[in-house]
Image: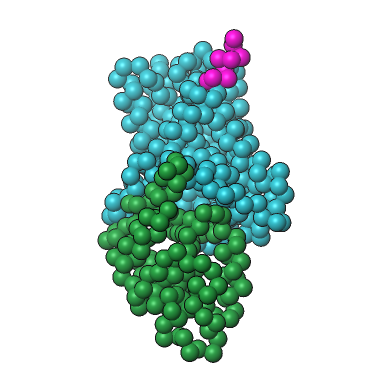
Chain colours: A cyan, B green
Amino acid sequence: MEAVLYFVRYLVFPGFLFSAVVGLLTTWVDRKVSARVQLRVGPPWYQPFADTFKLLGKEVVVPAGARHTGFLLMPVIGLAAATLASTILWLVNLRPETSFVGDTLVVLYVMTIPALALILGGSASGNPLGALGSAREMKLLFGYELPLVIAVLTSIVKVGSFSFEKILIYQEYNGVMLGSVSGVLAFIVMIFCAQAKLGFLPFDIAEAETEIAGGTHIEYSGGPLAIVRLNTAIMYLVLPLFIITLFWGGVNFVGWRILTSVLKYVAIVVIMVLIKNTNPRVRIDQAVRFFWGPMFALSAIAMILAIVGY
Amino acid sequence: MSLALKALKKSPWVFHVNTGACNNCDIEILDCLTPRFDVERFGVLLVGSIRHADVLLISGPVTQNILPRLKRLYEAAPRPIKVVAFGACGCRCGIFRDGYNIVGPIDKYIPVDAYIPGCPPKPETIISGIVKVLNQL
């Protein structure tokens, strides 16, 4: 019975179906806000759904030089991992008793899998531009993981526990992490790392449509492309939720807190879209230097402040 | 009408290829994405890879060098794909028809679903052409 319940949770409510719908709506918010920033009208709300259904109905082309299994399997593995991260995050927010020791680290690891799947899928495509995109994505991964982990550890050090439940309870009684200096610094680092993790400007080096024509997803078509895009959509839901849970008191669906939860989420998404729309693409060496230099310094300062108690 | 086809009408992604045009048409295509015309309202996106495309927008007469690549591009596109010949040169080779390196208009080599004439076509013409292509579905 317990197993069935977890299965339903994974596939339907906080899991796949719910995350996909909310994630796709978030990509619509992204496109609409981008359009408004550029003084355009932008697409209607059902646009991401139309895109997904269209792609599911199209022919799937597997290039002659590709490794079939790896090429087609990787988007599915990425999607499964993104869904798992989303399910854990929603469950600890809505039902804190489902939290377990070390779930922050589990989510941190699981969030890396979509990027790894994209790297493997790009290299399996047999396209030189795909391989180039994979190489760039890998370098970017090495770049942003370091400040990301230190920023997450800031919150953990402050609370003294590895579980989301303790972090949420701590914020309930002592005020949100964003109220402290270390919290604000770590929050800034997290926003930039999320930007890189989602492959948004200024860090869309691995996809770079105008330069390497889609990079890692250049050879995907039809259904697999829909899954790759769904993957990004769910990660778009996971990362703001992860940041809110660690630094901004989590989300909750009880009474008035629905409104504040949605506002927090939309605020983070809009910040990310604004960064995306006001910055040009950086080179890969600039990106790695940015993450290992200023961002690492900022997260290290946040960490030291958290240990001292600020 | 099936759901996939209905969705296709709402989100045609365009891959643009220049087969030897003078670049004027290409500038006019970019005009469609500007705030004044904003074709993203109808779900139209310019994509970077032929594997993502639903509409193949070809501008220019076909030159000898580009011909094999044009044929490969058409074969590489996932079906259903719609082909649109763009500009006077795309439709009938235009002022380049007597050129020594021109091997003929696009529809001599691959089936074309719609023609958008003009030198260059106005953005309004382009939008009307796209609507006609979508109504064929």
Residue at the location (42% across, 24% down)?
A: A250
Is residue A58 in sight in this rendering? Answer: yes
Determine whether B110 is above or below B43 in the image: below
Range drawn in magenta: A1-9
Q: What secondary structure predominates along the stretch shown in magenta?
A: helix
Is residue B37 positioned above or below A155 on the image? below
Residue A14 vertical placement versus A202 (above, below): above
Magenta segment: does it hold A5? yes
Residue B92 appears at what percent x and percent y?
Answer: 43, 79
Q: Image check: A137 left or right of A299?
A: right
Q: Position of residue B105 (x, y in %)?
A: 49, 77
Q: Is residue A134 magenta?
A: no
Residue most extreme to the top: A1
In front here: B113 or B15?
Answer: B113
Name the foreground residue: B61 vs A255: B61
The residue under the point 56% across, 34% down is: A82
Q: Position of residue A246 (x, y in %)?
A: 47, 28
Q: Residue at x 27, y 61 (%)?
A: B36
Q: Nearer the viewer, residue A159 or A264?
A: A264
Residue A162 visible? The answer is: no
Judge whether A12 appears above or below B23 on screen.
Answer: above
Q: Which image quarter holds the N terminus of chain B?
A: top left
Total marks in image:
0
- The picture places residue A129, in percent across and down from the top left corner, at 62, 59
